[in-house]
Image (tube, rainbow, N blue to C red):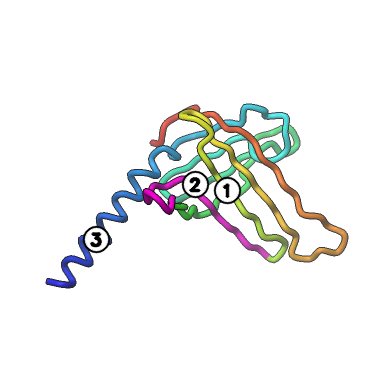
Amino acid sequence: MKHAVVIVAVLALTTTCCAQMSRFQGTWDSVDSSRPGPTRVVIEGKKIRLMGNCDSKPCYLGEVKATPIFSLTDKKVIALQATKSTKLAETFVEIYPESAQNLRISIRTNPALPAGRRAMTTSGIFRRTAPAP
């Protein structure tokens, strides 16, 4: 019986987490596509796909797995965070609701080999252009 209670509690937390993450789901386009960094972000489940402009053409920048960040007071998902590490750099992504239809997305990339390379930071507002599929 004790195991059944634990399983139900874990399932309830998982369901609540995923339901709360629905406000982040969908396709989001930058309100200022002239700024450096991603111009489109697609969030499906816990996957975050980033697209940008490379040589004036749309290009795929990569994918990261999101971790929900919970409020300490009411246990609601208040943000998403993700980290991706490669041999060349470590990238941190933070996503916060700005309003019902906008997200603030901040990205910081720290070079693994700092020989003359500086960290790059970009942040912008993204507007929902399509709901999650």
Q: In which quadrant of the rendered image does the N terminus lie?
A: bottom left
Amino acid beneath label 1:
Glu
Q: Which residue does the numbered mark 3 point to in the structure image?
A: 9
Q: In which quadrant of the rendered image does the C terminus lie?
A: top left
Residue 92 placement: quadrant = bottom right
Amino acid beneath label 2:
Ala
Pick the front one: 55 or 104: 104
**For residue 63, side relative to residue 4 (left or right):** right
Rounded to the nearest angstrom, the CA distance separating label 1 from label 3 is 28 Å
Is 72 colored magenta in this rendering? yes
Residue drawn at 69 percent across, 40 percent down: 37
Q: Which residue does the numbered mark 1 point to in the structure image?
A: 94
Q: Earlier in the sequence, mark 1 or mark 3?
A: 3
With respect to residue 62, does 88 lie above or below? below
Residue drawn at 51 percent across, 47 percent down: 48
Q: Which residue does the numbered mark 2 point to in the structure image?
A: 79
With respect to residue 55, does 11 lie above or below? below
Residue 51 placement: quadrant = top right
Rounded to the nearest angstrom, the CA distance separating label 2 from label 1 is 7 Å
Rounded to the nearest angstrom, the CA distance separating label 3 from label 2 is 22 Å
Pick the front one: 86 or 67: 67
Crowding near pointer 1: few (<14 within 10 Å), some, many (20+)?
Answer: some
Is 34 colored magenta in this rendering? no
**For residue 31, side relative to residue 1 (left or right):** right
Coordinates of residue 83 in the picture (x, y in percent): 58, 58
Q: Are marks 2 and 1 in contact (CB under 8 Å)?
A: yes
With respect to residue 70, does 43 lie above or below? above
Crowding near pointer 2: few (<14 within 10 Å), some, many (20+)?
Answer: many
Q: Are marks 1 and 3 in contact (CB under 8 Å)?
A: no
Chain part drawn in magenta: 71-86
